[in-house]
């Protein structure tokens, strides 16, 4: 995890971070915080840079994975669900899974709980974790990586499912604020952010705001991943759009609905992808294109938590 460097300036653009750290065939965590804080800015840049044969890993990636499948970037999907929370199944995901368009994809089937346990095993250096929650489900039949065994601590038959560890190459994280060294604060729903990040070989942080190190140091309990575990920090306001980010951005439901309507066939997806991703140079241009639509999603209210006292004397 990370480059192990402390107080080393890691600020760079998303384009530079992906160019340096993400190669074809990489396994990538895209959205470890469930419906919150999905790194769409990274998704767009992966498409612009034409990455291929990616393995996308997420409990819920919403339309992020669907976009990458439609753009021909994906060989494998490891997750519990791919689609559009606002609309249903992702059209590109369905076309790839059922008809091999634009490329066949291999699906590694998990439940939300078992993919969390797989990240947990990867984070703590365990080869696998036994669970019982999927006994009797078809996930055991559809995912040959998961094996059945007997609990060795009982004399009576007691089956368990063995979930092998997941250790992704890259984890992209969207956070509310970070310093230039990679120390960051994230609050609200964090889902599997910490487990997935520790399990990953490299971490790229997309920060809504860059702050001085003293701001991060003022509340160390809010740091899920310390800076030495991070490889790159990118200042990208609204990197999660159209997904929400607690205290910063509301969910853009209209955008999700429009995506679902406008990507029903491969040709219309390509037109959508050209307009919103390929023909834009970067996320700043994407935000400019959104214009007032994005500003309406900015959270203006305040609901701060009570201060915590870290005094030692």
Image (cartoon, rainbow, N blue to C red):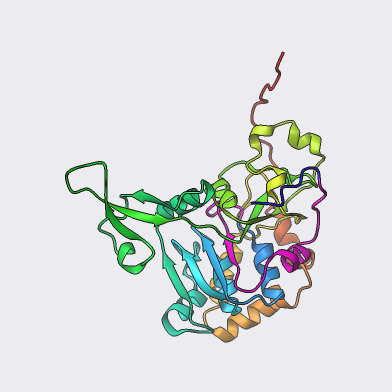
Instruction: Write down the quadrant of residue 45 in the picture.
Output: bottom right
Q: On the image, which quarter does residue 214 sit in?
A: top right
Percent of width and height locating residue 4: 71, 47
Say if the magenta span includes residue 118. Answer: no
Quadrant (top left/top right/bottom left/bottom right) for the C terminus: top right
Does the magenta segment cover residue 33?
yes
Q: Residue at x 55, y 84 (%)?
A: 266
Residue 230's place in the image compared with 168, above or below, is: above
Residue 25 vertical position relative to residue 222 in the rendered view, above or below: below
- Pick out the residue farthest to the left: 156
Q: Position of residue 117 (x, y in %)?
A: 44, 50
Q: Residue at x 44, y 78 (%)?
A: 97
Work out whether residue 249 can be spotted. no
Dominant secondary structure of the residues highlighted in magenta in the image: loop
| In this rendering, position of residue 50 left or right of residue 192 | right
Between 261 and 110, the one nearer to me in the picture: 110
Where residue 284 appears, as percent x and y from the top left, is: 79, 63
Q: Left or right: where does residue 212 sit relative to residue 255?
A: right
Which residues, given as a range, are shown in magenta? 8-37
Total number of numbered labels? 0
Relative to 31, residue 248 above or below: above
252, 178: nearer the viewer = 178
Image location of residue 53, percent across then percent down: 58, 76
Is any part of residue 118 visible from this angle? Answer: yes
């Amino acid at each position: 995890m990370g480059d192990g460097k402390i107080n080393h300036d890691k600020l760079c653009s998303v384009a530079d971070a992906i160019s340096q750290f993400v190669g074809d065939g990489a396994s990538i965590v895209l959205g470890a915080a469930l419906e919150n804080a999905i790194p769409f800015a990274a998704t767009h840049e992966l498409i612009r840079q034409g990455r291929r044969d990616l393995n996308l890993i997420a409990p819920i990636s919403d339309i992020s994975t669907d976009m990458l499948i439609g753009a021909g970037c994906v060989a494998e999907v490891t997750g519990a669900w791919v689609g559009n929370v606002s609309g249903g199944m992702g059209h590109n995901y369905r076309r790839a899974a059922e008809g091999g368009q634009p490329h066949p994809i291999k699906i590694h089937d998990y439940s939300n709980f078992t993919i969390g346990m797989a990240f947990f095993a990867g984070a703590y250096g365990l080869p696998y974790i036994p669970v019982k929650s999927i006994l009797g489900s078809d996930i055991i039949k559809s995912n040959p990586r998961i094996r059945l065994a007997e609990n060795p601590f009982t004399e009576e038959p007691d089956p368990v499912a063995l979930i092998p560890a997941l250790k992704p190459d890259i984890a992209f994280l969207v956070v509310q604020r970070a310093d230039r060294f990679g120390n960051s604060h994230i609050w609200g729903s964090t889902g599997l952010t910490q487990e997935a990040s520790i399990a990953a070989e490299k971490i790229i942080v997309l920060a809504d705001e860059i702050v001085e190190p003293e701001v991060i140091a003022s509340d160390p309990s809010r740091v899920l991943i310390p800076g030495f575990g991070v490889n790159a920090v990118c200042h990208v306001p609204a990197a999660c759009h159209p997904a929400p980010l607690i205290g910063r951005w509301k969910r853009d439901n209209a955008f999700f609905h429009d995506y679902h309507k406008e990507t029903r066939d491969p040709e219309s997806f390509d037109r959508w992808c050209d307009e919103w991703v390929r023909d834009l140079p970067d996320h700043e241009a994407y935000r400019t294109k959104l214009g007032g639509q994005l500003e309406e999603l900015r959270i203006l209210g305040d609901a701060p938590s009570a201060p915590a006292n870290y005094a030692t004397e």
